[in-house]
């Protein structure tokens, strides 16, 4: 899931505008605009908050954003490293979901309430959206 897709998901789940997302993350609206346009990228701590707000695995968001950042900088060796790691994470998460569903654990990917001050989920979930 690309950075812009993560932003879109957060805004859709919470019915927020980019302006509201910026306020919730304590960044300027132009920062969110720059993330959308690929001119800049959220720092890892903001990736964790975005992941929590979207209900996705933080490591996947960080890896995706860092791969995009490296690609923009022309560092293709780093892109390959991040994408390899991302592929392994996605495979691991898929295995967890398959295990959970076989054991009767709910794998509902619905929107979860998030503490907007800390970015922490208020209820644990297992989710794959990409």
Image (cartoon, helix red, strand yellow):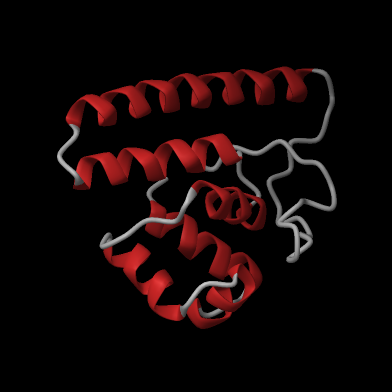
Place of residue 114 in the rendered image (x, y in percent of width and height, measured from the top left): 76, 59
Q: Is residue 110 above or below residue 22?
A: above
Which one is in front, 4 or 47? 47
Q: Is residue 130 visible?
A: no
Residue that protrudes farthest toward the left in the picture: 74
In the rendered picture of this protein, how many numbered marks are placed on residues?
0
Q: Is residue 76 above or below residue 19?
A: above
Place of residue 3 in the rendered image (x, y in percent of width and height, measured from the top left): 40, 53
Q: Is residue 105 above or below residue 111?
A: above
Q: Is residue 110 left or right of residue 57?
A: right
Place of residue 62 in the rendered image (x, y in percent of width and height, measured from the top left): 48, 41
Place of residue 68 in the rendered image (x, y in percent of width and height, measured from the top left): 30, 44
What residue sits 57% from the left and 19% below the top?
92
Quarter of the N terminus within the rendering: top left
Which one is in front, 112 or 65? 65
Q: Is residue 115 left or right of residue 1?
A: right
What residue sits 66% from the left and 49% below the top?
55
Q: Is residue 9 left or right of residue 78?
A: right
What residue sits 36% from the left and 63% below the top?
35
Quarter of the figure with residue 20:
bottom right
Q: Is residue 36 visible?
A: yes
Q: Is residue 60 left or right of residue 125?
A: left
């Amino acid at each position: 899931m690309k950075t812009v897709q993560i932003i879109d998901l957060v805004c859709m789940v919470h019915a927020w505008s980019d302006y509201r997302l910026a306020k919730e993350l304590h960044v300027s609206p132009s920062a969110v605009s720059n993330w959308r346009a690929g001119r800049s990228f959220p720092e890892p701590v903001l990736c964790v908050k975005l992941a929590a707000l979207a209900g996705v695995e933080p490591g996947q968001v960080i890896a995706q954003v860092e791969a995009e950042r490296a690609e923009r900088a022309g560092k293709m060796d780093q892109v390959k490293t991040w994408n390899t790691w991302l592929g392994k994470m996605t495979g691991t998460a898929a295995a967890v979901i398959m295990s959970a569903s076989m054991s009767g654990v709910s794998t509902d990917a619905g929107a979860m309430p998030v503490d907007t001050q800390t970015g922490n989920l208020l209820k644990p979930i297992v989710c794959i959206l990409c």
